[in-house]
Image (tube, rainbow, N blue to C red):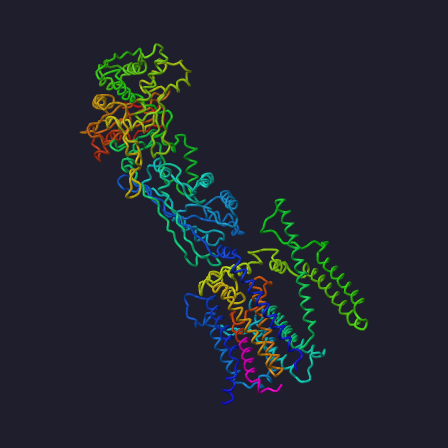
Amino acid sequence: MAREQNILKKIDLPLLLMYFALAFMGLLTIYSSSYDENYPAIYTWTKPYGKQLFWLFVSAAIGGIILLMDSSLIKKSSYFVYGFVLLMLMVVLVMPPINGARSWFKLGSFSLQPSEFSKFATAMAIAFYMSRINVKLQDIRTKATLIMIIAIPGGLILLQPDAGTLLVFFSFIFVMYREGISGNILLIALLGLVISVLGVYVSSFETAEVNEANINELIAQGSYSASRYKEIARGAGFYSNNYTLAIGLFIVGGISTLLVRFFVLPRYRKSYYPAVIISTVGAILIVIAINWSYDHVFKTRHRSRFQIMFGVKEDRRGDGYNIYQALSAIGSGEVTGKGFLKGTLSNEKYKHVPEQSTDFIFCSWSEEWGFIGNTVLILLYVSFLIRIVMIAERQRSKYNRIFGYSVASILFFHFLINIAMVIGLAPVIGIPLPFFSKGGSSILSFSVMIFILLRLDAGRSEELY
Amino acid sequence: MDPYQSRRWVIILIILFIGVIFLSRLFYIQVIDSKWIDRAQSITHSRKIIKPSRGLIYDRNGELLVIAKQVYDIWTTPKDIGEVDTLELCEVLGITKADFDKRLKKARNYAPYKASVFIEGISQEDYGSIITKLKHYKGFETKKNTQRGYPHDIAAHILGYIRKISAEQYAKDKLKEEPYYLMDDYIGITGLERTYEKELRGKRGALEYLRDRLGNEATELSTNYAQEGKKIYSSIDLNLQEYGERLMNNKIGCIVAIEPATGEILSMVSAPTYSPTGLVGRDFAKTWSALSKNDSLKPLLNRSVYNSNYRPGSIFKLVQALIAMEEGVISESTGFPCNKSLIGCHNHESPSNIRTAIKHSCNPYFFQVYKKLILRGESNSIFIDSRIGLTKWKEAVASFGLGVKFNSDIPGVKKGNIPDTTFYDKWYGKNRWAFSTIYSNSIGEGEIGVSPLQMANLAAILANKGYYYTPHLVKKIGEDGDKKLSFKERHYTMVDSSYYTPVREAMEQVVLSGTARQAQVDSVAVCGKTGTVENKSFNDHSVFIAFAPKDDPKIAIAVYVEYGTWGGTWAAPIASVMIEKYLKGVLSEKGKRKEKRILEAIILDKNSDFKH
């Protein structure tokens, strides 16, 4: 008993309070976004807010149990939890599909989404594996094992299919970075991302231009009709600016090689040449591959989304509908917002914003609380994430630190992708905003993550490794 | 010591950087860029038009003449129709395939993705059977509407009809400073519906609301209720109008009855007439083309105010007598011989004064009266003298409301024709006409053209001894309203009221022992004058005006029966039963006999053979 009281005293209060604040704001937003005048009570079990409240209680209860557990028990159960979740991910693939995806176990009016739990399970497995004494990240073997740990659940999730959740598994790159993989990898990843985005942008821009020219021609002929018009791709012999970009990259690579030849000491040249040559060839291949895939791999709807995201096309009825409605809802919140329960776009009553209580729930908050509310939300989220990083950093145990960073990375990725999508900075990707989007598995999974972290942190002085 | 400790700052910086980007972007969307507020408005805000109900029309005693009837319009959104069995659908709607195609094409041309009226004005009885089957078709919906209904089915010419606004009218309205009409609004086309369109249509209201994703009304923002159209109380006496229309059945012509003390029109019958109910709703086009194209008797024409070949005939002698006395060219006791070499006449003693001249309707007498009016010896040239005379005469005649257009509320009023110097100059050439050319005017023939309304007004002038109120159809606009101010203004003739006495007495004699004995009403002093308007190769028109009772006139009336021969044959008895009905409510035995004879008569042939 004495020890348990001790534990409760050692809990990191700022993180716990911020967790409660986010959970409360989330509940409030779900209440507002799915409010039904006939059932105003927040504990109406048949309504999303009643369910969210229920899952918050469940989360608190499980959180309490986690806090009472022994740290070492949590750590030791890592592989077991990971294995159990993998099993669930496999079983769920034979379940009847809901909305075209086999992601849920249906239990009466409640449903369970194992992919949500795979996030912290994978984090536990990675932490457990890497905290073993003889494991060094520099070893190829270690890297391969880590990729395996991430790829197995990732692959199973892709089979559901649920590309959004899969994307979250890329967030572990931050953990690896902190644990010492070469910073170049992050840099290369960033460079690859920039070149890819540039390549997609050029393709999108050109396609939009080609289409506009085509439309103008049809209008001049008098045979244009909006309903019948189908988007056309760039012609077969089209000279894309991506080729110019590739040539540019080739020239930059050539000059870099010459620079190495003249300015780098001979004994270092050997390690420089491959780096320059590989990155040049890689970059050129990426540009050409993207240019080709844009026309041949992506479908019209994907191209459409890219064009909308880059602002070269505005399609408020078709593919751009979601984002147009979302931005209208957010923009109409102005500085102070319309007030709680006073939204006119993103709630169940009006439903102008689709998925207003799941992926697009940020609209609901933005509309009702305005820029002031958004400032509170963003600052709170950023503080929350930084607090997790700080907590992770003060751990003596490697497991604790790695798990802490995993939690921070997973939450940060959700935060980044979800809000960027809703405010029109990223293409539409279905991914929830933690603590806000409705969904029992989601709130439970994120809560468990936080409570495990709180428990590990509270017991950090007892740990030796 | 952990060598990668400092990497935490890279990660923290990335998190902060993303936070800053998000806040900047949100600041731009929510605070700086105002376009999203407008876009949100256009997504959420919507308004619905609330149409006012059109004002009702009553008779002078508060009986309903025009009501509003609930009907249904079928609307279509062409894009939503999809593949359907057109023939089956036509059967449901009760239209032909050609008609269906025509209507659909019209709707498509308007806007394929917007709803527009497909069939208007389906009665409640038909609606029941149509809607049960129409439910299975996409792209069609029904909307409630109101349409005109006529409980008594009379007075079609007076009431007029309404129609959906035409493209031209709509375009014209759009050019106004404050355009009112919408594409599917109804507008008065003729009759009172047209004259009092502004009062009857009311004022449109609007409901502003927030809509949901499907366009349904989710939250009411504000309501601006519609103001229903004003009630119009017409001056028509329902019973008299109905009776008049019955009397004129199977005849061509008209009856106009005026209350002399006010100028209010008690009844205005134009025969043949038509049923106003036929011009309502979906039957409109069929009825209208039948009435306008396929009917040689022109039932749509309101003969009371307009017919180019109506002349006053002998009735005009009353005006000639009055003007001549006022001008001093004759006196009450001036006599002229009945010289048939001047102009034809029937056999009677030579009139020794105005009274006998009017009683016998002596043509040579008024030839000489008119000659004195036109040739006054003010110039040596008969041409110039005629010009001076005609100008003075025309001015005097105009003061009787003849040859002038009443500023009234009766649509289509015509001014008729009282010829002046310009008229004859154009006709014959300047100084190429004189009295000898125009003498036919003396007995109300020649170039004189009048409307029956003007004739009824003449009777009213005689009843009032020298003045009239502009004849009008509406006595009250709105329940507590009033009539137009201009209708309360007296118009005096240029003839002094003392000169009316001999003329009125002569008119009484006309009824008692002259040409209009058929116009007698028991115990009522009727004053009248017959007219027989010449038609060269057909029967003459039978014309009669009268007012009664002589000392306190309640009704002034004019009757035209085309091809009815002598004024006393048909027009006089019709006027007398109208007067009797109005003054007494029931007819005497004598009246009933007259009524029977009138109702049985069919005078549609231009050369009917009447046995007197």
Residue found farthest to the top: B380
Q: Residue at x 78, y 65 (%)?
A: A259
Nearer-the-camera pick, A213 or B352: A213
Whether residue B574 is visible, yes or no, is no
Residue A137's x, y, as percent?
69, 79
Q: Which residues are magenta?
A: A445-465
**Left or right: where does residue A12 sit relative to residue B505?**
right
Residue A432's x, y, as percent?
55, 69
Q: Residue at x 49, y 53 (%)?
A: B137
Q: Magenta residues: mostly which secondary structure?
A: helix
Q: Is residue B220 above or below residue A269?
A: above
Q: Is residue A138 above or below residue B134?
A: below
Nearer-the-camera pick, B557 or A388: A388
Does A453 lie within the magenta span? yes
Quadrant the C terminus of chain A occupies: bottom right
Q: Is residue B120 above or below residue B256?
A: below
**Quarter holding residue B434:** top left
Nearer-the-camera pick, B431 or A178: A178
